[in-house]
Amino acid sequence: MTWISVEDRLPEIDQEVLIYLEKDDDKYIVVAQLSKWCYNQWAYSYGLKGFYDLDPKIEDAIITHWMPLPDKPEIC
């Protein structure tokens, strides 16, 4: 998979993706989605599927790229 610039296109609303963001010389990669409930703002996962919230890291950060989540691992 390759990173997609937010200038080229954005993911679908409510699609879980990885986003790359920078804030105050720090860099993050987090699972996030564009939320229709938050006026198309980025919301990120706290680790439990379906539990999303706006985060100060995202609200004030520069989000430059995103990519779809990888496939789930195969479990024997």
Image (tube, grey):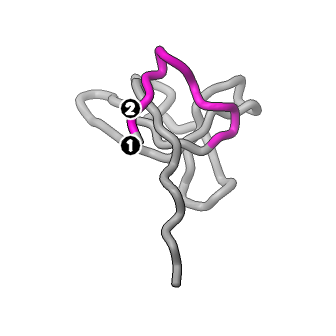
Residue 11 position, x and y percent, is 60, 30
Q: Are marks 2 and 1 in contact (CB under 8 Å)?
A: yes
Q: Which residue is mark 1?
A: 29
26 in relation to 60, above or below: below
Residue 18 position, x and y percent, is 47, 42
63 in relation to 53, above or below: above
- Residue in the image at 60% along x and 61% along y: 48
Amino acid carrying mark 2 in the image: Leu
74 in relation to 41, above or below: below
- Residue in the image at 29% along x and 36% along y: 27
Q: Residue furthest bottom?
A: 76
Instruction: Choose between 28 and 23: the one closer to the eye.
Output: 28
> Residue 49 lies in magenta, yes or no?
no
Q: Which residue is mark 2?
A: 21
Tell me if 35 is positioned left or right of 11 in this view: right
- Residues shaded magenta: 2-15
In the picture, which quadrant includes the N terminus? Answer: top left
Tell me if 14 is positioned left or right of 45 in this view: right
Main SS of the magenta part reads: loop
* Mark 1 Cα shell of 10 Å, populated few (<14), some (14-19), many (≥20): few
- SS type, badge 2: strand
- SS type, badge 1: strand
Residue 49 position, x and y percent, is 64, 58
Tell me if 41 is positioned left or right of 5 in this view: right
- Residue in the image at 52% along x and 57% along y: 71
Tell me if 25 is positioned left or right of 58 in this view: left
Q: Earlier in the sequence, mark 2 or mark 1?
A: 2
- Residue in the image at 38% along x and 32% along y: 21
Residue 53 position, x and y percent, is 62, 43
Q: Is residue 61 visible?
A: no
Amino acid carrying mark 1 in the image: Ile
